Image (spheres, coloured by chain):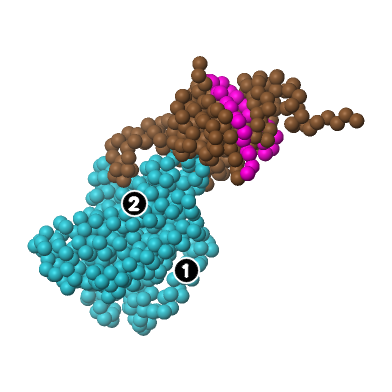
Amino acid sequence: MTPLLKVENMTHFFGGLRAVHNYNLNLEKNKIQGLIGPNGAGKTTVFNLITGIFKPSEGSVKLDKEEITGLFPHQIASKGLGRTFQNLLLWRHLTVFDHIQIAHYSQINYGLIGSFFGTKKRRKQEAEIEESARRLMEIFDISDFANMLAVNLPYGAQRRVEMARAMAIKPKVLFLDEPTAGMTPEELIRMIQIIKNVRKEFNVAIFLIEHRLKFVMELCETIQTLVFGEVIAEGTPEQIQNNPQVIEAYLGKEDIT
Amino acid sequence: MKPIIRFKKFFRFFSAMPALGWLFGFLTAVIIEYLIGDNIAWMLGLPKIPALFGFLIMLKKPLLIPGASAYIIIVYLLPLTLTARFCSGTINKIAAKLYKLPTPVYTVLYLIFLYIIIDIWAGISDYRIVTIKLTFIAIILTLSLNVINGYMGEFSCSHTGFMALGAYTASTVTLILCANDKLFGEALLPSYLAPFLFPIALIAGGIIAAIGSLLVAIPSFRTRGDYLAIISLAFMFIVKSLIENLEVLGGARGMGSQPHLANLPTVFIWTALSIWIINNFVTSIIGKATNAVRDNETAANAMTVNTRKTKIVTFMFAAFWAGIAGGLFAHVLCYVNPGTFGIKKLAEIFTMVYFGGLNSVVGSIIGAISFNLASEALRPLELFKWIIIPVIMILIMIYKPTGLVAFKEFNIKKILAPKGDK
C-alpha cells in the first residue's frame, strides 16, 4: 500500500543554515504519527515545508500520489492537507462561526457573480456550508460559542476552534502543531479524546508535533525524533522511549568520571 | 428622578416606531414644507426656507436663530413627534403587512418611498439637490474605500486616483458621443440616446479604474501597511499628473460641459445598487475571506483561501465603485479638473470611513451622510470649519477608535422590521 503522504529526501536551507536534512516521511491512512524533538530541532519547519509556507530546497512531497512540492499553501490545503498552528493563528475580528465558514472557501464555486448578486446558487451553497459548519461546531463542542469572537474564548476552546477550522477544509491529512501547548491536565485529557474521535469520525491521518510525552505515548502509533534537522530515531513509542540516542538528545550525555 | 422618567416617556414613542414610521413622519414634514414652507418662513421672519435644517442661517445671522429653530420645530419635529405619538400602532400594522412580502419586494417599496421623500425635500432648492447628490456619491466612495481599508485592512491611499480615472473615462465617453464641446467636437449620437448611454459610460469608467487598481493590487502581495500606503499614494499622484499633462483631456484646465445626465434618480439608483452589491459581497464567504486575509494571512492561506486572488478581486471591486462614483461626480458638477482629485479629497474620504466605522456598511453610510451634511452646515464658518471637523475626528479617535458603528453587519430585515408595541 502506498502511503497517503510521502515525503522523500527533503532538505531545506535558511541561507547557510541547514534547517532540515534528508527528511523522509511515510504517513499511512488512518494512522497517527508523532514528531518530537528538542527546541529548535526544526519540527515546525518540517510542517511549514510540507504545507507550502516554505519551498523545500530539495526533495519531493506527494499527497495521495500527487506531487505537491512547490505549490502555494492554499493549493496544498485545498488538496486535503489541514493544519493548526503552534501559536494559534485565529482571526481577531471574526466569530467562531465565521472561522469555520471561511475555511470552506475551496468548496465554493458560485464565483464572483454569485457573491455580488446573491444568486440562487450562492444561497444554496452557503446554506450547505452553514449546515456543515454547524455540524463541525457540534463535534468539537463549540456550538455555544458560535457567535462569539474566537479570541475571547478560553484557551482550550480556541484550540478546538482551530481544529474545527482545519477539519472544515475536508482534509485527508491533519497536521497538529503542539495541540496541547499551555493546556491544563484536564484539558489535555479532553484533547486526547477529541483527537481520537476526529480520527474515527473523519478517517484522517494525523501528524502531530508534541512535547508532552504522556500525550505522544498515548496517541501515536509511530514516532519520529528530530534533532538538528535530522531524524535520529523512528519507531513505536516504546522503542523511542528506550532509544539511547533520543535520551541523549533530550537529557544530554551521561558524564562518567 | 421625575424629569428623567418623563424624558424617557417622551422618547418611548420613538422607540416603538418602525422605519416606516420615520418615513411617514418625514413625508408629512416635507409635504408641509413643500406646500406652506414659504409662508411659515415668512411668518418667522426668515428670508427663505432654511436650506439645510437652518444651520446655514443660524451661523450666518445669529439674530435669526430663534426663527430658524422655530421653523425646524414646526416643520420637522412636530410632524415626526405627532406621527410617533398617534400613528405608531397603525403604521406598525402596515409595516408588519409589508414585512410578510418577500425581502427584495419590500426593500424596493421602501426605497421608492424614501426616494419620494428625498425628491420632495430636494425640490425646494438647487442647493439641496447638489448637496444630496454629492452625499450619495460620498456614500459610494466611503463604502468602496471601506472594502479595502476596513474589510481587507490594507491602507490604500489611491482612491481619488481611481475616482479620477472613472471621472475622466466616463466624461470622455459622454463628451464624444453625446455632447457638443470644444475638446471632441460635435456629438456623434442624437441626444435622446444619452440617458441610455450614461450607465455604459459609467461602467466603462469603473472598468478602467479597476484595471488601474491592478498597479496597486500586485505590489500588495508582498508589502503591507506603511509600504503599501506609500505605493498607493504614489499611484494617486501618477494618475493626477498624468491627467494634468494630457492636453487631449484638457490638461490642468480640466474638462467641462458634460451633459446633465446625473439627475437625482440616477444617482439614487446607483447608490442603492452600490450598497446592495457591496453588502452582498462582504457578507458572502468570498467576501469574508478578505477579513481572514486582514486578520492573519498565513492562517487564511492554510485554510485554502487564495489570498492573491482575494486581494486582486477586492482592489478591483473597490476601484470599480470608486470609478462609478467619479463618473457620477463629473456629471453632477458638469466639470472636472485633476486638482479635485488631490490629497484633500482623499482626506475627506478617509475621514468618512474612519468616522463612520471600519468593516461596516451601516457605518460607512452614516459616516458619509453625517460628514457631508456637517461640512455643508459648517460652511459659513469658512476656515474654522477645518478646525472643528478635525477636532470632532480626534474626539472620535479617542473615545471610539474604530469609528461610530464598526464591525456590524448590515441587516436590512432588522432595520425594516415592525416594532412590537408594549
The number of numbered discs placed on residues in the rendered structure image is: 2
The magenta segment is A16-41
Q: Is residue B381 visible?
A: yes
Q: Left or right: where does residue B15 sit relative to residue B225?
A: left
x 49%, y 59%: residue = B227
Q: Is residue B409 visible?
A: no
Amino acid type of the residue that numbered disc 2 sits on in the rendered structure: Phe
Quadrant position of residue B349: bottom left
Quadrant position of residue B289: top left
Task: Name above or below for residue B389 compared with residue B111.
Answer: below
Q: Left or right: where does residue A83 sit relative to residue B316?
A: right
Per the rendering, the mark at residue A46 is none
Provide the letter of the chain coloured cyan.
B
Depth check, front residue: B33 or A28: A28
**Residue A230 position in % (x across, y down):** 65, 31
x 67%, y 39%: residue = A40
Q: Left or right: where does residue A160 sit relative to residue B196?
A: right
Tell me the element at label 1. Answer: helix
Task: Name above or below for residue A227 compared with residue A243.
Answer: below
Amino acid type of the residue that numbered disc 1 sits on in the rendered structure: Ile
